[in-house]
Amino acid sequence: METNFVILGTGAGPGLPSFFCDCVGCREARSNPALARTRSGAFLDTGTTKILIDTSPDLRQQLIREQIRQVDYVFLTHWHYDHFGGLGELEYYVKLVRHEPIPLFLPPSAVPQFTAAFPNLREVFSVRAWEFNKPYGFGEVSLMPLPANHGIETAGFLVSAKGCQLAYFPDTAGLPAESAKVVVGVDWLVCDATFHGENWFPHAHMSIEEAIALGQEVGAGTTILTHMAIHYSQPVANKELQAEATRQPQVAVAYDGMRIRL
């Protein structure tokens, strides 16, 4: 059965366009909605099981756009608003269609934060703490949380399916040595490339250049750049961004709705 990894959103916290920004990238995205970037998230479809990775504030829009009508599990990389802010969008799906809570896997440190932030969603989700380096199996597909460098407890996920491997690290500053060893030789590395130009937060994010270098370091088959805020540090238009990023072989710029067949 075919397994697909869908990149639902490819933007950093402000999204693209941002309501408060009039840089060249935001102006371009306003005039051409195909160039917009909703906040980061992904969807793993094993053919039978449907898994959300992060729930951005744009989740409803993303699910409608991709015609996703079933969600069986939710895994969160970390407890930052642009990655959990859409949890409430699943409330009426559970109440009107599913009729049972969705298993929600969180960083251990985020479990009490969920309870404090969303007391009215306790009946919507069955909350569990994920464990680093533990593979969660879904038939022939597994999903394993790996440590990321992001200031708070954060995971990337290694997806393994039928001999293929994809590593998804939307928020990280390089990789801890233990994670880098695990992802060596992955077919796809989908990773944080927040900054175009100077990296303002080198302990939490990467620039485009740093993301490309990481892909080369771990020997990824293809490095896919995501979690992009092209109005951080040096605004850039899409054509220039594509030209810069793809000068190196086996590098691609993610776009909302990008599908990778595993």
Image: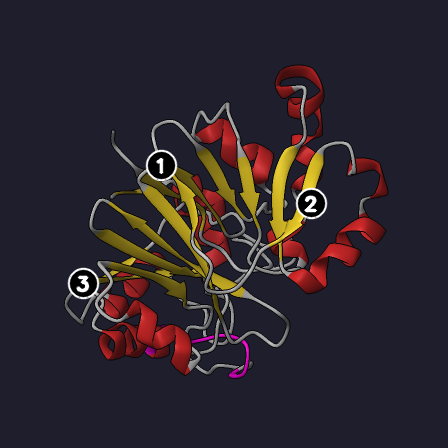
Precedes in sequence: disc 3 or disc 1: 1
Amino acid type assigned to the residue bearing label 1 in the image: Gly
Residue stretch rendered in magenta on the structure: 202-209
Residue shown at the point (25%, 29%) measured from the top left: 1
Mark 2 sits on what residue? 127
User: Does the magenta segment cover residue 206?
Assistant: yes
Mark 3 vs 2, N-terminal side: 2
Question: What residue would you read off at disc 3?
Answer: 221
Label 2 – label 1 distance at C-alpha: 22 Å
Where's residue 184, x and y in %? 26, 71
Residue 159: x, y in percent? 35, 52
| Residue 258 appears in view | no
Front position in the image: 62 or 177: 177
Task: Indicate the colouring scheme.
Answer: secondary structure
Q: Secondary structure at mark 1?
A: loop
Specify the quadrant that holds the C terminus: top left
Can you give x and y, in whole percent of width and height, for residue 20 in the image? 65, 57
Between discs 2 and 1, the one toward the N terminus: 2
Question: Which quarter of the figure has residue 150?
Answer: bottom right
